[in-house]
Image: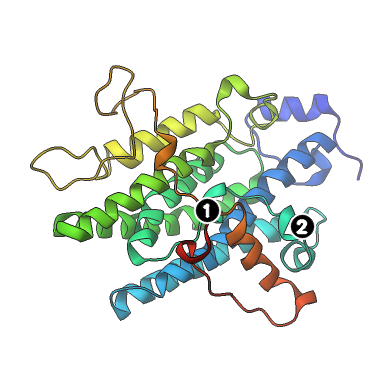
Amino acid sequence: MEPANSGALEALLKRGELVESTSEMTPDYLRELKHTLLVSGDTELISAPAYYLAARKAPSVNAFMTGIAIIQDELAHAHIAYHILEELGESQEALIFKRDPKAFRYPYAFDVPLESWTELVVANAMYDQAGFCLLGDIHEHGSYGPWKRGLVKVMAEENFHLRNGRNWSKRISQAGGEAREELQRAVDWMFPLTVEWFGLPDNLKQHSTQLDYRLKGLTNDQLRQQWLSTGFRAHSMPTRSAGTSTIRAAGMRSSSGGASGGRATPRWSPSSRRASPSSRCAHEFLPAFSRRSGAPRLPAFSRRSGAP
């Protein structure tokens, strides 16, 4: 069937209806939808091996099984995005197994390996909260019906990931001593990397196609602020003050100089960003998926032993 003309699609979107098939799309809508799905699928896929390295350091069998359950969820979430892409004409086989590692699209944070259980739970508290905000926006406002319905499962499972991150972060923080300091160090380098998940500031964005097509409902800055408010003010990751065991976000200060809260303008020191070789993590993980290079095998490596 021929794609719908732009006038028909615009009218459908204005009525608040859902797009259900390619026959209702314009080529531009289809292109933007595929791009958004690809970033989502790639991010979920690369999180699995990144989380696995840290899950191996779990303090108990129960904790390890929780980590494995989270990894299983992330792979299922990736499958949802890739399956929808296949229904839109792409090859799921080619997307996962035949692409060059440089062609995968995901946040920079996953270029930095996670090497401890503490780093995994901070990733659950920060990275999964960012994903929850981004996908929750699509689930609530998105115009493509099949993905909107597929995200019902994803949102329920992401809640489980968030609880693991928040509960363990609180537990480690209350333990005090070196355990709390390790938690603080993880927050220090992971916080600015999570801020990057939401893309360019609104004043630097060059187009608003995703918003125009209702593929998302909130701007980058609105989503970033939602993450800051939800992840740190409301869910046990507030600023650390004397006499408490809570954890501060790395370098965060309000525009007035106090600890961040509410709608403060976020600023942080570049020194809090952990040094790592660009794209090293994913470029070692992703070739392991390729069927051109033999049986998959995840490499062993360390930030500390090889980072410049």
Residue 284 left/right relative to 131: right
Query: How far across and down, in percent of the image, does residue 300 sit?
Result: 53, 74
Would you call the spot at circle 2 few (<14 residues within 10 Å), some (14-19), or many (20 or more)? few
Residue that carries the numbered disc 2 in the rendered image: 87
Residue that carries the numbered disc 1 in the rendered image: 276
Q: In which quarter of the image is the N terminus?
A: top right
Mark 1 residue type: Ser
Query: How far across and down, in percent of the image, does residue 190 sit?
Result: 41, 48
Q: How far apart are marks 2 and 1 (CA)?
A: 37 Å
x 20%, y 59%: residue:
178
Q: On residue 21, which mark appears?
A: none
Q: Is residue 218 visible?
A: no
Mark 2 residue type: Glu
Residue 220 left/right relative to 243: right
Residue 206 left/right relative to 53: right
Q: Which residue is situated farthest in the left direction here?
A: 243
Q: Is residue 1 visible?
A: yes
The one nearer the camera, 39 or 15, is: 39
How does the figure colour the protein chain or chains?
rainbow
Q: Is residue 9 above or below residue 110?
A: above
x 72%, y 44%: residue:
35
Element marked by disc 2 = helix
**Quarter of the view holding residue 122:** bottom left
Query: How far across and down, in percent of the image, does residue 23 sit?
Result: 83, 43
x 34%, y 42%: residue:
231
**Quarter of the view holding residue 207:** top right
Q: Is residue 282 above or below residue 40?
A: below
The one nearer the camera, 257 or 232, is: 257
Query: How far across and down, in percent of the image, does residue 121 sit?
Result: 35, 59
The one nearer the camera, 186 or 200, is: 186
x 31%, y 80%: residue:
61
Of mark 2 and mark 1, the one earlier in the sequence is 2
